[in-house]
Amino acid sequence: MLSLIRFLGFIHSRWSTLQEEFNKQKELEVLMQKERVHTFFQPILSLEKGSTIGFEVLNRPETSTYFPTTEQFYDYVSSSSEVFMAERFLRNLSFERFAEQIRTSQRHKDHLVFLNIQSQVLADPSYQSGITLDLLAKHKLSPYQVVLELTEKEAVLNKVQFERMIEHYRQQGFRIAVDDAGTGYNSLQTLVSVKPEFIKLDKSLIRHIDRHIEKQHLVELLVEFALQTDTTVIAEGIETLAELRFLRCLGIHLGQGYALGKPMDYLDDGCMPIVNSAVQKQIV
């Protein structure tokens, strides 16, 4: 009798899991079919010149029953069997909406486009076959404008195959950025194997970096690595003038964060705050 009760409990638990998975899949399909996704563009600035060099495209789905937050939506997508379909949809949406913005603001037509992707999506035949190039041509965009941000934090199991895929995209003109750099061993391993054109320092490293000597030492090491490998460093999540001032003194090339420009639903050049000793005394 006890065994039967346990078995029925297992069946009920399994059924509930399958039902939830089915509901999430249907909700994802509805979000894509009706394009219930808001697209935002956050500027990336040169910390030396203060000019905008490009934008990161941020796609945020409408709040729904099974995806109450953006994080939960992307967590599901990255681990589901729908990852290729969802990523294709988001990629197409990003290019389409960026191109729409350029048509109304030609001064941004040559800016870089930073696009987040899951690393396993690089194996998607529609990426490798040239469909992405055709899509870019349709919207009058160049692959040389596109920076593919690798967001997957898991270790790359087949490094040889992964490096070949990366080289394939480089030959097409795309550039590569490693996101969340400095957050763990896997991200550092990815820096070595991928040899990216851009390193994006995780915002957890940037927060209050002016006060934390351990963070300063780690960022200094990453900057030194970047200088030796001819890689451009981007500091993410800059929110205070103190952080900005320290990063500029450290020689960080590019920056992104609320102190420079918030994500907007249109292309809006960021603004470099005036940072000097007087301001520093006021904010520390």
Image (cartoon, rainbow, N blue to C red):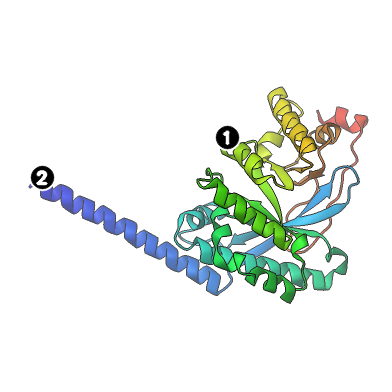
The residue at 55%/59% (across/down) is 123
Q: Is residue 193 above or below residue 116?
A: above
* Furthest residue in direction top, as rendered: 213
> Of the residues shown, which amino acid type is indicated by label 1?
Tyr
Quarter location, residue 56:
bottom right
Mark 1, residue position: 185
* Furthest residue in direction bottom, as rendered: 138
**Residue 69 drawn at (x, y percent):** 54, 54
The residue at 80%/69% (across/down) is 102
Q: Residues within 10 Å of mark 1 (few under 14, many from 20)?
A: few
Disc on the earlier residue, 2 or 1: 2
- Dot 1: what SS? helix
Mark 2, residue position: 2
| Left or right of 172 in this view: 153 | left
Q: CA distance from mark 2 to mark 1?
A: 46 Å
Quarter location, residue 214:
top right
| Left or right of 83 in this view: 14 | left
